Image: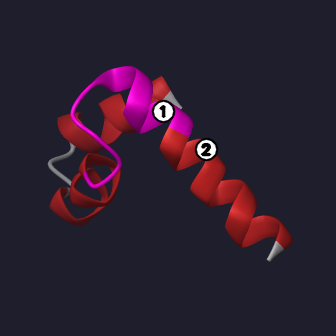
Amino acid sequence: MLAEIMSFIENSEVEKMTWFNSFGDCLRSVIVNAHDDSKRLEFG
């Protein structure tokens, strides 16, 4: 997931960076919350 975040930053993908940013202000919070959200969408 960290590589995914870095690629969004390098490619200036603002929409995707905003989505990640909505999960918190520290890297740990972002990763944990984004993972939880992805699983929520996967399992409904």
Q: Quadrant of residue 19?
A: bottom left
Farthest residue in the right direction? 43
| Residue to which mark 2 is pinned | 35
Q: In the structure shown, which secondary structural element does the residue marked by tag 2 occupy?
A: helix
Is the residue marked by circle 2 packed among few (<14), some (14-19), or many (20+) residues within 10 Å? few
Nearest the camera: 37 or 2?
Answer: 37
In the rendered structure, the answer to whether residue 33 lies left or right of residue 15 reads: right
Which label sits on residue 7? none
From the top left corner, tell me how far across and down residue 15 is, in percent. Answer: 23, 66
Q: Which residues are magenta?
A: 22-32
Which label sits on residue 31? 1
Residue in view at x 31 percent, y 59 percent:
16
Farthest residue in the bottom direction? 44
Q: In the rendered structure, which amino acid carries the disc numbered 1?
A: Ile
Q: In the rendered structure, which amino acid carries the disc numbered 2?
A: His
Residue in view at x 39 percent, y 36 percent:
30
The quadrant of the image that shows the C terminus is bottom right
From the top left corner, tell me how far across and down residue 6 is, in percent. Answer: 32, 29
Residue in view at x 14 percent, y 48 percent:
12
Q: CA distance from mark 2 to mark 1?
A: 6 Å
Indicate yes or no whether the magenta region holds residue 3. no
**Taking 27 as reference, is 18 above or below it?**
below
**Taking 30 as reference, is 36 above or below it?**
below
Do tag 2 and tag 1 residues touch (Cβ < 8 Å)? yes
In the rendered structure, the answer to whether residue 31 lies left or right of residue 24 reads: right
